């Protein structure tokens, strides 16, 4: 498929360098050189974030993947302003007729009826409680959550029903909800996973331009831990030759901040993400790009991505095996994953969530 070439210079605060049309569109468009354009005129103007309201029909998604430790999840938003260039959720924007590139970072959909839908589903007499993952696709604490508070509304419903939830985020905004999380933690109803890709600000700034800085994420781990909320550190994704040398340092920093558990996920490049990541590499790490791509292929059966269950999260081959061993040894060294306490569903109650009726 013809692709639009990336802009001549990176956009401040954005990771993607191109904005190809949805793969479902019948037509494609290509940029052509404009000789009349002034040399000092920016080729691509600053792109502002636009938030659309979406009335979702259902809010709890189900999966049967053997690679995931949960079968139910909630995503309050479509698209993510964090703009992580490697995000495996980017291709889902094509289903909206939008680009997995810049559109994914700048054209966001907020499910403002999420809390009401969740309450109705949990109250249904046939509902069977299971741990819900919050933020399995896009980050529930991306910047627009500060004002919209959709994630907080979801947590309020889950707390009323005494329903367990596992949160994954790259944002320090999660500490805003410590009041709810602390009460839920006292009943073994919540755990938080903080994703840390790199401790180097110069890498994180371009790799995840609007996510919290590495130091802010570690501070969030400390705040959550001090409040008695179970928290873990995720080295995700591991990018060979670029961030993989930091695996031990990230696990050490997470443990020192108060994390008790840890996990890692290998870089995944499904569909359009392969091209977007390649453009990013060529822009910010041109001398290392070919080596990174070669190592990725070695762990993906000679391809950029292998979607098979059982290997898509960790890869195959010598380098992938080395990562597994390094992770295991580092966890032992820093006291991570020494014990795991599964969240409980025994407190779930529809009665506790029902508002009290007036006597008169």
Image (tube, grey):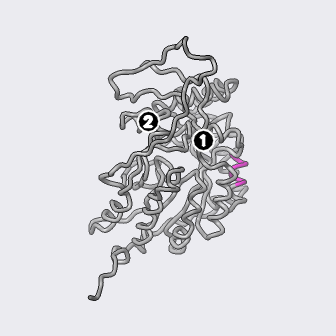
Q: Quadrant of the N terminus?
A: top left
The percent coordinates of residue 3 (x first, y second) are 46, 21
Number of the front mark, 2 or 1:
1
Above or below, comparing residue 24 to residue 187 in the picture? above
Tell me if residue 56 comes above or below residue 302 in the rendering.
Answer: below
Q: Is residue 102 left or right of residue 255?
A: left
Q: Main secondary structure of the magenta part?
A: helix
| Alpha carbon distance from label 2 to label 1 | 17 Å
Q: Residue 352 at x, y = what percent?
A: 37, 77
Q: Earlier in the sequence, mark 2 or mark 1?
A: 2
Query: What residue do we see at 68% from left, 52% from top?
Result: 251
Residue at 70% over, 24% down:
287
Pick the residue in front: 148 or 343: 148
Q: Which residue is mark 2?
A: 91
Residue in view at x 36 percent, y 33 percent: 97
- Relative placement, left or right, of 355 versus 46 is left
Task: Name the image quarter holding the C terminus.
Answer: bottom left
Front one among 348 and 51 = 51
Give residue 38's position: percent from left, percent from top.
59, 17
| Residue reaching furthest to the bottom | 359
Magenta region? 247-253
Instruction: Report if residue 251 lies within the magenta region.
Output: yes
Query: Across the whole image, how many numbered discs are drawn on residues?
Result: 2
Which residue is the site of mark 1? 208
């Amino acid at each position: 498929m013809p692709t639009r070439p990336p802009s001549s210079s990176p956009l401040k605060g954005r990771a993607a360098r191109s904005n190809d049309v949805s793969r479902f569109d019948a037509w494609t468009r290509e940029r052509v050189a404009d000789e009349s354009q002034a040399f000092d005129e920016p080729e691509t103007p600053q792109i502002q974030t636009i938030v659309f309201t979406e009335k979702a029909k259902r809010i709890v998604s189900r999966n049967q993947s053997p690679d995931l430790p949960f079968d139910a999840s909630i995503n309050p938003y479509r698209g993510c302003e964090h703009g992580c260039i490697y995000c495996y959720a980017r291709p889902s924007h094509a289903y909206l007729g939008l680009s997995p590139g810049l559109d994914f970072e700048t054209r966001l959909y907020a499910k403002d009826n999420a809390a009401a839908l969740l309450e109705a589903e949990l109250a249904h007499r046939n509902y069977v409680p299971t741990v819900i993952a919050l933020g399995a696709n896009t980050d529930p604490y991306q910047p627009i959550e500060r004002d919209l508070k959709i994630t907080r509304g979801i947590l309020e419903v889950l707390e009323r029903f005494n329903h367990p939830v596992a949160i994954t985020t790259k944002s320090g905004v999660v500490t805003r909800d410590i009041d709810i999380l602390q009460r839920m933690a006292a009943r073994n109803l919540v755990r938080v996973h903080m994703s840390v890709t790199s401790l180097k600000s110069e890498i994180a700034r371009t790799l995840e331009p609007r996510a919290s800085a590495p130091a802010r994420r570690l501070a969030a781990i400390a705040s959550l831990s001090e409040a008695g909320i179970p928290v873990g550190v995720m080295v995700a994704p591991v990018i060979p030759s670029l961030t993989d040398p930091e695996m031990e340092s990230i696990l050490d920093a997470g443990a020192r901040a108060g994390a008790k558990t840890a996990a890692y996920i290998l870089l995944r490049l499904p569909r359009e993400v392969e091209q977007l990541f390649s453009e990013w590499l060529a822009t910010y790490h041109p001398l290392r790009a070919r080596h990174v791509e070669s190592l990725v292929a070695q762990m993906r059966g000679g391809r950029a991505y292998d979607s098979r269950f059982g290997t898509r999260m960790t890869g195959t081959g010598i380098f992938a095996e080395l990562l597994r061993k390094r992770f295991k040894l580092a966890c032992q060294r820093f006291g991570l994953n020494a014990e795991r306490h599964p969240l409980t569903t025994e407190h779930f109650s529809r009665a506790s969530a029902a508002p009290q009726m007036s006597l008169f």
